[in-house]
Image (cartoon, helix red, strand yellow):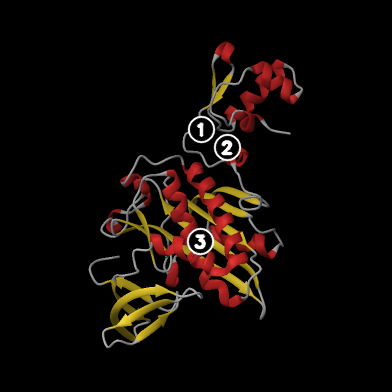
Amino acid sequence: MRGIPEILSGGGFVSGEEISRELGLTRAAVWKRIEALRAAGWDIESGGKRGYRLRAGDSLAPELWQPRLTTRWCGRGEVRFDREVTSTNLVCRELALRGAPAGSLSLCETQTAGRGRLGRSWISPPESGLWQSVLLRPALPPQSAPLITLTVALAMAEALRETTAIPVRIKWPNDLVCEGKKICGILLESAADPDRLEYVIAGVGLNVQPGAVPEELRGQAACVADFCSAPPRRELLCAYLAALERDVDTLEREGFAGLGSAYRGLSCTLGSAVRVSAGGLESFSGTAEDIDAEGALLVRCVDGSLRRLWAGDVSVRGVMGYV
Ligand code: BTN
């Protein structure tokens, strides 16, 4: 049975009579429940005869976005929404270890120990970003992990293209950038046995409002609202979960062949001059030519040789600036 926040999640007024009919409660009991919800922080407006309306603002409360979710499995299962967590990747790992199904999700307003790639931290201030991790259990071998990285980046880029007009591109393997500045980072953590991936945690941090980007990072990072009037975060979330489900299903069925042209079309790395550094051991320049079926980046070096690079092993910078 739906609760009152779900009944009001459409954004318009719903009469007290309609609510009492749906819940099988008297009008007085409905009013009592509305009062209790207000006391718990829900912003519910009374419109006299028109009934009640929920002012949802930019809330990420699952009651507000789950009724609109179009997926079969992604963003379903166990959904944890917390105001504050250490890291959604850690919460999601607990879900994985408890046997939660694929598509389970940890979502929060703020992380106190957000994790970035290469052991860095990820700053995650409240009400300004989409900080979330989805549990995946793809029927794929462990060698496919790099392809999942590309798939998650593609899904978020597609979701942003569907819901906003921002010129988002993918910097291989999985940063999303707009006009040369990073707006989204992705951190995958996985466990595998020799034959198959047991689980993959797809942690994604999307900067939505300016508060997400500390002043000192402004030179290289940006947020969605820098490029358009940002939709509510729950709309971005639903679009991302739908794209992720579609793309993970395609990857399982067809491998990267099914996603390659979409990924290449959104890539800002392919065709560009890049400088590659691998853990301080060596550094070389070349042109990013293609991505192969296993997700490796093919770089044509100045001496004409072709080198295959794996996500995680290297950091690729555009020779001209961040991209
Ligand atoms: C990067 O360094 O580019 C990756 C950043 C990934 C950040 C996200 S925010 C949600 C999830 N939880 C974390 O602790 N990290 C990821």
**293 sits to left or right of 17:** left
Q: Quadrant of the C terminus?
A: bottom left
Compared to residue 297, the image places residue 266 above or below, namely above
The one of 119 and 130 positioned closer to us in this rendering: 130
Amino acid type, residue under disc 2 in the picture: Leu
Q: Earlier in the sequence, mark 3 or mark 2?
A: 2
Residue 143 in the image: state x and y as whole percent. Answer: 57, 77
Q: Is residue 68 above or below residue 121?
A: above
Q: Mark 1–mark 2 contact, CB under 8 Å? A: yes
Q: Is residue 8 left or right of residue 97?
A: left
Q: Residues within 10 Å of mark 1 (few under 14, many from 20)?
A: some
Per the model, the C-alpha gap separating discs 1 and 3 is 28 Å
| First in residue order: circle 1 vs circle 2 | 1
Q: Nearer the viewer, residue 289 or 13?
A: 289
* x then y, percent, for residue 48: 56, 12
Residue designated by label 1: 56
- Name the residue: 57% across, 48% down: 82
Tell me the SS state at disc 1. loop
Crowding at label 2, few (<14), some or many (≥20) Cα neighbours within 10 Å?
many
Is 154 on the left-hand or right-hand side of 9?
left
Point 61% across, 63% down: residue? 93
Mark carried by residue 81: none
Q: Given this view, does label 1 or label 3 mark the residue nearer the observer? A: 3
Q: Quadrant of residue 27?
A: top right
Numbered tag placed on residue 64 in the rendering:
2
Q: Amino acid at mark 1?
A: Ala
Along the viewing direction, whichever of 46 and 35 lies nearer the viewer: 46
Residue at mark 3: 152
* Residue 198 image-quadrant placement: bottom right
Amino acid type, mark 3: Val
- Nearer to us of marks 3 and 2 is 3
Q: Residue at x 57, y 14 (%)?
A: 50
